[in-house]
Image (spheres, grey):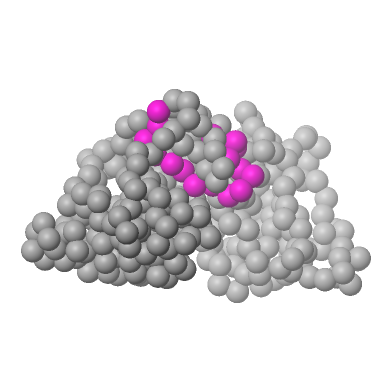
Amino acid sequence: MRARVVLITRRGAMTKYFAVASRGTECVLAEELKSVGVTPVEARRGGVAFGTRLDHAYLVCMWSRVASRVLFPLSSFEATDADGLYNGVGAIDWTTHLGPDVTFAVDVAGKNAPSGPGHFIALKTKDAIVDRIRAAEGVRPSVDTHTPDLRVNIHVRGSQVTVSIDLSGRGLHRRGMDRSGAEAPIKENLAAAILRLAGWPPPDVSRPFVDPMCGSGTFPIEATSMALDIAPGLNRTLGPRGWRGHDRSLWNKLQTDAAARAERATTRTLRVFGSDVSATALSIAARSLRRARLGSRVSLRQQSLKDVIPPGSDPGVLVTNPPYGARLGDDTELIPL
């Protein structure tokens, strides 16, 4: 069966890229993208459609703390079976995006696809891409599911399929934190969204910030990085190094600009405090702080919640992720907490 390939339709202002967000944080992400100078933006289910130029996409990869991925949609089509999926993916001119000299991986998101389960969709997508490139250039690219030069994202919602280039590569929520041994840590991009909702950073970043149940330290580390104007993508290798549309000089310029902003903010006075009853959790937090070169900027202390007192008389911000819920604890532990 031949796929019915259609143009991607967009409501409102024309946008070219899509930033994926945790459910419920779409509006927070939209405001964040505006704050870094990206327009137009349009909050949608699961993320934000934004921008019209490549520098917009790279700005989001560099500066967004709330987005988890940045996608460049190529095509959207209906696929009611496996052949429809293969034909729809194969209709894309893949030689514009990658050649036989790079490796790639296929990520599948969504559900209820009549074309098959996720692993099968990834396989058929891979077949369509390599067949198209081999027919055009005589050699096929290789698949590397661990450290590919390029990631292709397939989003399915029923029979609707959207094919995108993943400009972020590894998820943007990965900031290099040490999560080994941590119990159910909150993801960095969700923590950043919560911090923005809490009004952090304030105009005066010397206001105290406290997380009295900091666990592995996600909130204190994110809060400190935000207050010191450290771009989350500053030391990141941009995802699509194998993408033929990659503008290396543009990315290098954004890194240079971000490094200069972080340097100017080094003299800011911060009062960031984290505490936890678990020595193991605090050890993980300390390692992550050292890895982020923020060890001297955050004060950690082992103490029970009942012993925590405000670190001064002036008002500040308190944010925490209580250690209970679906993934941690039970009712008997919740009562004394």
* Image quadrant in which the N terminus is located: bottom left
x, y (%) of residue 332?
A: 89, 72
Front residue (pair 228, 198): 198
Residue 209 spot, x, y in % from top left: 69, 44
Residue placed at 37% from the left, 35% from the top?
A: 16
Furthest toward the left, the residue is 138
Residue range corresponding to the magenta coloring? 14-30
Residue occupying the far right of the picture: 335
The x, y position of residue 240, in whole percent, is 29, 52
State left or right for residue 101 relative to residue 223. Answer: left
Could you tell me which residue is drawn at 81 percent across and 37 percent down?
313
In terms of image quadrants, where is residue 333?
Answer: bottom right
* Residue 89 in picture, x, y percent from top left: 30, 55
Using the image as rendered, state which of residue 287 and residue 222 is in the foreground: 222
- 255 vs 232, left or right, is left
Magenta segment includes 329: no
Residue 181 visible: yes
Residue drawn at x 78%, y 34% as measured from the top left: 314
Q: Residue at x 63, y 63 (%)?
A: 185
On the image, which quarter does residue 57 sit in? Answer: top left
**90 left or right of 233?**
left
Nearer to me, 10 or 72: 10
Numbered circles on residues, count: 0
Whether the magenta-drawn stretch holds residue 19 is answered as yes
Residue 208 appears left or right of 12: right
Vertical comparison of 235 with 41: above or below: below
Please state which of residues 184 and 99 is positioned toward the viewer in this rendering: 99
**Does residue 257 appear in the picture of this structure?**
no
Tell me the quadrant of the picture where the C terminus can be found: bottom right
